[in-house]
Amino acid sequence: MTTTSPADVAPPPVAGPGPGFTGLFASEWTKIRSVRSTAWTLILFVVITLGFTALFTWLTVSNWNGPKAGPRDARVVIDPVGFILGAGLGLGQLTLCVLGVLVITTEYSTGVIRASLLAVPRRLWMLTAKCVVFAVLLLVIAEVVAFGSFFIGSALLHSHVPVSLSDHNVTRAVLGAGLYLTVLGLFSLAIGGIIRHTAGAVTTAIGVVFVLPILSGLLPSSWGAHVNGYLPEQAGTLIGQAVPPAGGNVLSAWEGFGVFCLWAAVLLAIAGYLLQKRDA
Amino acid sequence: MIEVRDLTKRYGDKVAVDHLSFTVEPGRVTGFLGPNGAGKSTTMRLILGLDYPQSGTATINGQAYHDLARPLATVGALLEAKSVHPGRSARNHLLFLAQTQRLPRTRVDEVLDLVGLREVAGQRAGSFSLGMGQRLGIAAALLGNPQVLLLDEPVNGLDPEGVLWIRNLIKQLASEGRTILVSSHLMNEMAVTADYLIVIGRGKLITESSTADVIARSTDQSVRVRTPDAARLTQLITEAGGKAAPGGPARQGDPPGDNGAELLTVTGLHAAQVGEIAAHASIVLHELTPVASLEEAFMELTSGSLEFGQHGTASVSAAEGSTR
């Protein structure tokens, strides 16, 4: 390996303002795009979501009026867009939970957090930039996938239940599904920031999103429904349905999304507080 | 300039840094010497704002690390613990750091050339050898062309060529007027690299002075003598080729009063020789104690810090290697 002396290298310009957020955004974008786990998880997200949307919709259509299909078919007729979006995203969202966690826990597992904080000792700036860059990336991909799911699903369902974006609340539901997934990513990132270990954080995120609703379903119905309605996943996914679910929910679509955002905001605040307070 | 004032850090009930104060001046290489577990890495993390002290302050050019507007343009650090994602290329690692400081992309290639990693810059850092990883760490430290550098055990695990490269680089950087703090647990390494030494053990300052001074002192054996007939003994010791100076540092177990006896610190003669001289002249001695040299004190601390058991008989460098 050949080396030159440090004196041969001209000093970089020192003038100009401090780094500012433009530099931090660029830096977080470089971080997120330069590891393979990002691309792999996002590819998995797209394939699983679109694949299962097509599979479930096709199965439903090919078993239309089949045995025991009555209540299900009725639900599809009432809220076709909710059915289509729920089919693939229900599974696909798992990958975004994992990615959200990885975006921050790999900094701890690899020690990159030390390099990051040496470069940006204002720790909350670093976390903010990371959240913004990750949210923008997710929003773009999640909206593309939400619309893709809708078009695949509606095409397959067309012969039985025609549904289009101009139908009541349908565009809101499709856009809303993308919004939900974006906030879910931030929700998971916050859990990753609090727990700092990949396995523990992934387990927690998935537990909160998938297992809590099942547990709260075991509660006595009167207040069980209320607890259930405010759980992150239950509240957040309301926005992806054009018609409120059978039996109703205690929250409206936008209220539900607001509650979910509040969950994410509180967790991010805790993550930020702990990042600021703990030794790196 | 780095100023550490009364810095204390505890992890649980274990004290890692204990009321430590020192100053690192520009234009020379300051060695930060101490056995493993003495608190060198912790002190560096405290200076860099990665860990928070329970008390005390650490400033760089008068500012806390947290308050530096473009920290990498002021301070460069090579930490002992890995801080690179093994799946990220060397270039992207340096790029994301450069972007936080709004440094131009060309600066990344400049430091890659500087450390000789240009050809492998696109490879995943996880595929790098220990030496290449260390070079990448140096590249990151030099990215912002900082005036202050903190290097934690930079030669650890390097082959002789790598060791020589780092030594020359450090000397050159110091000759350019930079402030450089280099830690090591090896006195020999410090002897050839550092101009000035800060020696710590168990989180406390043991001594600080120029390297030449420390080496001179650590080879000088001294003997503490307490006698009522100090004047005559001083004369006899001088005649025998030794040197006796009145007084000496207080030690645990010193008698409360001096009981008419005076304390002398003798150099150039062994304790046995001093005893024989005194016996021939029938001079009463109240105390005759060989004083451990700095090197011995250092070794004592070193063996004390290897309290984990399995390294009991291993050499310091072997123990260090196994912790990586």
Image: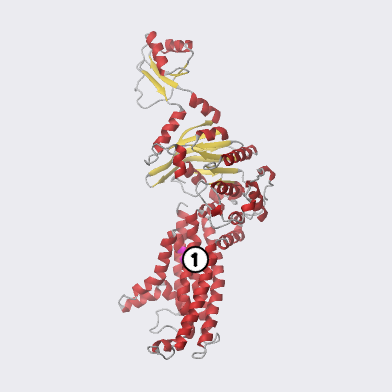
Reply above or below: B63 against B285: below
| Residue found 49% across the figure and 55% down from its top | A110
| Residue found 46% across the figure and 10% down from its top | B235
Residue A134 lies in the magenta-colored region = no
Along the line of sight, the residue nearer the viewer: B68 or B189: B189
| Residue found 49% across the figure and 83% down from its top | A81
Q: Where does the image place residue A96, in percent across and percent down from the top left?
A: 49, 69
| Secondary structure at numbered mark 1 | helix
Along the line of sight, the residue nearer the viewer: A83 or A271: A83
Along the line of sight, the residue nearer the viewer: B131 or A163: B131
Along the line of sight, the residue nearer the viewer: A265 or A149: A149
Which quadrant of the figure contains the N terminus of chain B?
Answer: top right
Give the left or right position of residue B66, taking residue B275 as reference.
Answer: right
Few, some or many residues within 10 Å of mark 1 (<14, 14–19, 20+)? many
User: Can residue A161 be seen here?
Assistant: yes
| Residue found 47% across the figure and 72% down from its top | A93
Disc count in the image?
1
Reply above or below: A215 against B244: below
User: Can residue B64 be seen here?
Assistant: no
What kind of residue is marked 1? Leu
Q: Where does the image place residue A280, in percent across and percent down from the top left?
A: 47, 52
Reply above or below: B252 against A274: above
Q: Where does the image place residue A106, in percent across and percent down from the top left?
A: 49, 58
Based on the displayed image, in which of its 4 quarters is residue B24 positioned?
top right
Give the left or right position of residue A226, taking residue B137 as reference.
Answer: left
Q: Which residues are magenta?
A: A185-190
Based on the displayed image, in which of its 4 quarters is residue A192 positioned?
bottom left
Residue bearing mark 1: A99
Q: Where does the image place residue A170, in percent across and percent down from the top left?
A: 52, 83
Chain of the residue under label 1: A
Q: What is the magenta segment's predominant secondary structure?
A: helix
